[in-house]
Amino acid sequence: MKVVAPSGTGVVGRFETFSFALPRTRFDTILRAAAEAAGAEVREGVKVEELVYDGGAVSGVVTRDTGLGTRDAYRSRIVVGADGLRSVVARRLGRVRTIGPRRIAFTAHVADVAGVHDLGEMHVGRPGYVGLGPIGDGVTTVALVVPQAEAWRGAKFFDELNRFPGVAGRFDARRTVRPVMATGPFARWSRRAVTTARSRRRCGRLLRSVTGQGIYSALRGAELAAAAILDCLSTGASLRQYARARRREFAGKWLLERLIGIAVGWPG
């Protein structure tokens, strides 16, 4: 990983471990196929709109088929809200809170970016930063992250990239493989990872998935959640073990990410 300061000074860190990068379209397809092969019933084109309650606890979801417009209710002993930054599950339960700094990300896939090899890059500016990550076949993920107050300022994506000395002139807009997409603001958290309610033999009603940064957090959080769910269903153990395991696994990571976020926001 190469990190470049606003002054242009850079440092490269090489680690004993390694990262593996590939397009999300390919990665998500692999995950979907693996889940289906393991016995999951996959339903695409279905959007969760509401939660189903039983005695004040979550006991399922209400969905809408985005093609047909039909609505259905699904009941379950455990509901996992793994639905991302604007989680319907978390918002319906009033679990979302926001902390600063609030940032917006613009990303694109660009081919033949000059100087990209085996290193990921992070270029810090005033304001915001740019991240570069090769994903194979000569394609690079390019992400521009700026404070919410600075987006979009009427400028174009590649014009904004040229504000950063370490990446200026390295892109050809005509080599864009995937158009620019936007997401944010970030820094949203769920107030509580797990909500449980015991009624007869039901061991739990809601399990809120991890919302940490990055695919690693999502995948590792899913492993921890799966272990807690299986234990809950087989022995009646509390789902709160997931919250404890999650803290043990990610507390150090969360602190480091917070410190990095502060350093990027105030590079001086």
Image (cartoon, grey):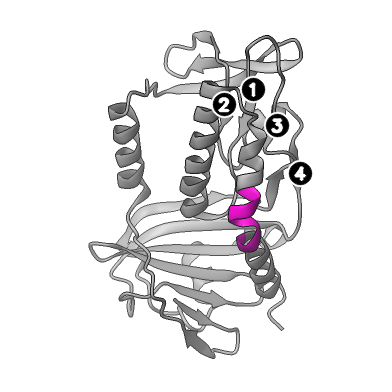
Q: Residue at x 37, y 68 (%)?
A: 18
Element on which disc 2 rests = helix
Indicate the amino acid at tag 3: Arg
Q: Residues within 10 Å of mark 4 (few under 14, many from 20)?
A: few
Q: Find disc 2 in the rendering and name its residue.
A: 232
Q: Position of residue 141 (x, y in %)?
A: 39, 61
Q: CA distance from mark 4 to mark 2?
A: 28 Å
Residue situated in front as seen by the camera: 212 or 123: 212
Indicate the amino acid at tag 4: Arg
Residue 44 is drawn in which quadrant? Answer: top left
Segment tinted magenta in the rendering? 246-253
Element on which disc 4 rests = strand
Indicate the amino acid at tag 1: Gly
Query: What numbered label is drawn on residue 91?
Result: 3
- In the depicted structure, whether residue 233 falls above or below residue 239: above
Q: Residue furthest left?
A: 137
Residue contact between numbered discs 1 and 3, judged by CB atoms under 8 Å = no
Q: CA distance from mark 1 to mark 4?
A: 23 Å
Q: Residue at x 70, y 12 (%)?
A: 199
Residue contact between numbered discs 1 and 4, judged by CB atoms under 8 Å = no
